[in-house]
């Protein structure tokens, strides 16, 4: 049994596909198949049911947590060696939170810690959860609460609630009238932009998306540009449209029959023992400074530690 076999098993289990796993690990599908067969021979059990779709067997389900534990320990060992060679911090963040939370915090941190290498990675919530699980990062900004089944252990250092207003270009907003209903807005807008701010969308957001005559799903920046051009409306987390609202390029719409929407985000670590690292604690405090400006603070463990 070797590390490449364990990595292949873990990757196929995640992706449910030998082909996808091969692409992720940058090897051929034949190599993945060979590694899985060798691992099955060594442990004396079939790990996958092969077919159009690949599923774990009962034996595979039982073996998976032990495989991931081994991979996790090896990753921890690598990270320890890297930090011994040179100070290094790795942070993951939701893509939309890089600018409002991480950028200024990074600048302040590096003014005082020029010898520390800092790696910032971004992605969607499930990608962030995977990075934490695999110990690729030490701090993470993610949606809260965490519902990803992969990441079973995570501690929130700061939890902030940010509102998610419905916005439109000023000229389009005028056509809605002073106190429109959601139905009236959807009837008069060219399209409704469905942006995935949540792990699981609130029922109200899902209902609006399903009732929209024309619905488009796209990333934040092109979505905001489309709305600014008067080509649609959408719910955006406030930090992503704060500048446009301030400059008058967008206006906030308050439907008379819609309760306010919000999103909770958290600055997290796998466990609080990590906070014994001086530089990790310092960077976390800098991110928390920005987080407290973002919205309503629901939990602040860092302030409790002060």
Image (tube, rainbow, N blue to C red):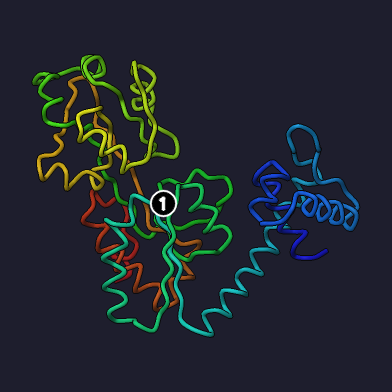
* Residue 171 on image: x %, y %: 11, 27
Depth check: 175 or 238 in front?
A: 175
Q: Which residue is mark 1?
A: 142
Image-quadrant location for residue 176: top left
In the drawing, does residue 115 fall left or right of residue 256? right
In the drawing, does residue 42 fall left or right of residue 115? right
* Residue 220 on image: x %, y %: 33, 42
- Circle 1 crowding by C-alpha within 10 Å: few under 14, some 14–19, many from 20: many
Q: Is residue 189 above or below residue 253?
A: above
In the drawing, does residue 66 fall left or right of residue 282? right
* Residue 229 on image: x %, y %: 20, 33
In the drawing, does residue 59 fall left or right of residue 299? right
Residue that appears at 21% across and 56% down = 293
Residue that appears at 16% across and 32% down = 169
Depth check: 62 or 124 in front?
A: 124
Q: Is residue 47 above or below residue 75?
A: above
Q: Is residue 209 above or below residue 137?
A: above
Image-quadrant location for residue 235: top left
Callout 1: SS: strand
């Amino acid at each position: 049994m070797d590390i490449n076999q364990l990595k292949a098993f873990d990757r196929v289990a995640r992706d449910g596909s030998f082909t996808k796993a091969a692409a992720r690990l940058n090897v051929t599908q034949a190599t993945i198949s060979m590694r899985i067969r060798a691992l099955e021979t060594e442990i004396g059990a079939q790990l996958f049911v092969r077919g159009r779709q690949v599923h774990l067997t009962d034996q595979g389900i039982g073996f998976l947590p032990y495989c991931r534990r081994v991979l996790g320990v090896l990753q921890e060992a690598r990270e320890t060696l890297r930090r011994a060679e040179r100070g290094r911090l790795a942070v993951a963040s939701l893509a939309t939170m890089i600018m409002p939370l991480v950028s200024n915090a990074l600048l302040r941190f590096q003014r005082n810690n020029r010898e520390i290498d800092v790696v910032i990675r971004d992605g969607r919530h499930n990608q962030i959860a995977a990075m934490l699980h695999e110990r690729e990062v030490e701090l993470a900004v993610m949606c809260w609460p965490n519902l990803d089944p992969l990441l079973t252990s995570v501690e929130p250092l700061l939890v902030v609630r940010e509102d998610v207003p419905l916005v439109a270009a000023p000229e389009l907003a005028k056509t809605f009238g002073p106190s429109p209903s959601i139905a009236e807005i959807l009837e008069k807008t060219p399209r409704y932009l469905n942006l995935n701010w949540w792990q699981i969308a609130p029922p109200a957001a899902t209902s609006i998306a399903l009732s929209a005559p024309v619905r488009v799903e796209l990333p934040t920046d092109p979505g905001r540009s489309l709305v600014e051009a008067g080509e649609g409306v959408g719910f955006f987390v406030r930090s992503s449209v704060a500048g446009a609202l301030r400059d008058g390029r967008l206006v906030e719409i308050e439907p008379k029959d819609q309760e306010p929407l919000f999103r909770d985000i958290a600055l997290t670590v796998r466990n609080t023992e990590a906070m014994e690292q001086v530089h990790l604690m310092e960077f976390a405090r800098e991110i928390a400074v920005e987080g407290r400006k973002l919205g309503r603070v629901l939990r602040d463990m860092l302030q409790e530690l002060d």
